[in-house]
Amino acid sequence: MSSDGGFGQYMGEFTTAVKYDMDVTHVLLNDDELGKISKEQRTGGWDVWQTDLVNPEFAAFAENCGGHGVFVDDADDPDEALEDAIAYDGPALVEILTDADPI
């Protein structure tokens, strides 16, 4: 499990999982920003600055690498996507769209 910022730094590792046919499922929480840094800025009482990201479609990236990728845009309903990814025989990635802003 990772966020988009963390996964973006190590995307190439998914190709390694494909190359060696590793049966792993990765859950990626995509909030289009460096959420940890944004949280630190908010906690400090500062404006959130320079933490937004422009991301590729990570689920499509997984498919392009030869694995299984699925995009979930309703964070309340990831069950079927997770079940399919876990059942997939090989590397899978479930990208779940989330919101970094606190409620």
Image (tube, helix red, strand yellow):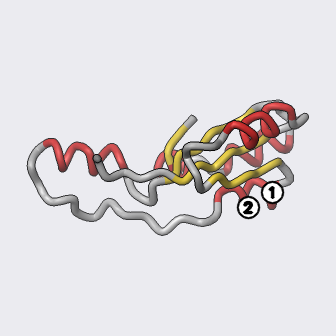
* Residue holding disc 1: 63
Place of residue 40 in the rendered image (x, y in percent of width and height, measured from the top left): 22, 43
Crowding at dot 1, Cα within 10 Å, few <14 / some 14-19 / many 20+, comes out as some
Q: Nearer the viewer, residue 19 or 91?
A: 91
Residue 87, compared with residue 65, is above or below; it is: above
Residue at disc 2, secondary structure: helix
Place of residue 48 in the rendered image (x, y in percent of width and height, measured from the top left): 21, 59
State the image quarter where residue 25 is shown: top right
**From this viewpoint, which residue is outermost toward the bottom?**
54
State the image quarter where residue 65 is shown: bottom right
At 28% from the left and 64% from the top, the residue drawn is: 50
Q: CA distance from mark 2 to mark 1?
A: 5 Å
At 36% from the left and 63% from the top, the residue drawn is: 52
Amino acid type of the residue that numbered disc 2 sits on in the rendered structure: Ala
Place of residue 83 in the rendered image (x, y in percent of width and height, measured from the top left): 78, 34
- Asked if the residue at tag 1 contacts the one at tag 2, i.e. Cβ–Cβ closer than 8 Å, the answer is yes
* Residue holding disc 2: 60
**From this viewpoint, which residue is outermost toward the front?**
76
At 73% from the left and 61% from the top, the residue drawn is: 60
Amino acid type of the residue that numbered disc 1 sits on in the rendered structure: Glu
In the picture, the quarter occupied by the N terminus is: top right
State the image quarter where residue 39 is shown: top left
| In this picture, residue 62 sits left or right of residue 38 | right
**From this viewpoint, which residue is outermost toward the left?**
45
